[in-house]
Image (tube, helix red, strand yellow):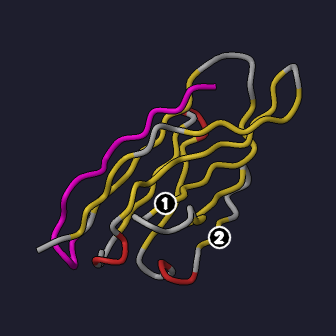
Amino acid sequence: VQLQASGGGVVQPGGSLRLSCAASGSGFSINAMAWYRQAPGKQRELVAGITSGGTTNYVDSVKGRFTISRDNAKNTAYLQMNSLNAEDTAVYYCSVLYIDSFGRKTSWGQGTLVTVSS
């Protein structure tokens, strides 16, 4: 499974961005999709996740500001980010947990940079 992330960029504090992550390939079924981020000098952290059934979870720092969603027909996950602040500046990575004929696997996207700056 290959992942293509997009939607990053530079935004002013208080602004919004929408990230997309499209999974491609054949012979797989996606269980869960998630967004992680890694800020300079910090460890990668889970930002938000969504199961195949639509159950979501968020890190406390983004609750009420970020919304994760998915389009199962398109194998695409989205991360709507509102009220962005400088602490949200990071490289955002999408990840999928999927099953194919060889078993359960995890795939990572290439990362997209989000910079929040005035």
Picture coordinates of residue 36, whole percent (x, y): 54, 58
Rendered view: 7 above or below 68: above
Q: In which quarter of the image is the N terminus?
A: top right
Which residue is the site of mark 2?
57
Q: What residue type is labelled 1?
A: Arg
Q: How crowded is mark 2: few (under 14 residues within 10 Å), some or many (20 or more)?
A: some
Identified at 58% across, 76% down, the residue is 59
Quickly name the residue at label 1: 37
Q: Mark 2 against mark 1, which lies toward the viewer? A: 1
How far across and how far down the image is residue 86, in percent? Answer: 28, 77
Residue sitting nearer the eye, 75 or 43: 43
Q: Give the range drawn in magenta.
A: 1-15
Q: In this view, does 82 lie above or below 97?
A: below
Helix, strand or loop for disc 1: strand
Residue 98 coordinates in the image, percent (x, y): 75, 36
Identify the disc placed on residue 24.
Answer: none
| 4 in magenta | yes
**Is 57 placed left or right of 116 in the picture?**
right
Quadrant where the image shows the C terminus: bottom left
The foreground one among 65 and 111 is 111
Where 65 sits versus 81, above or below? below
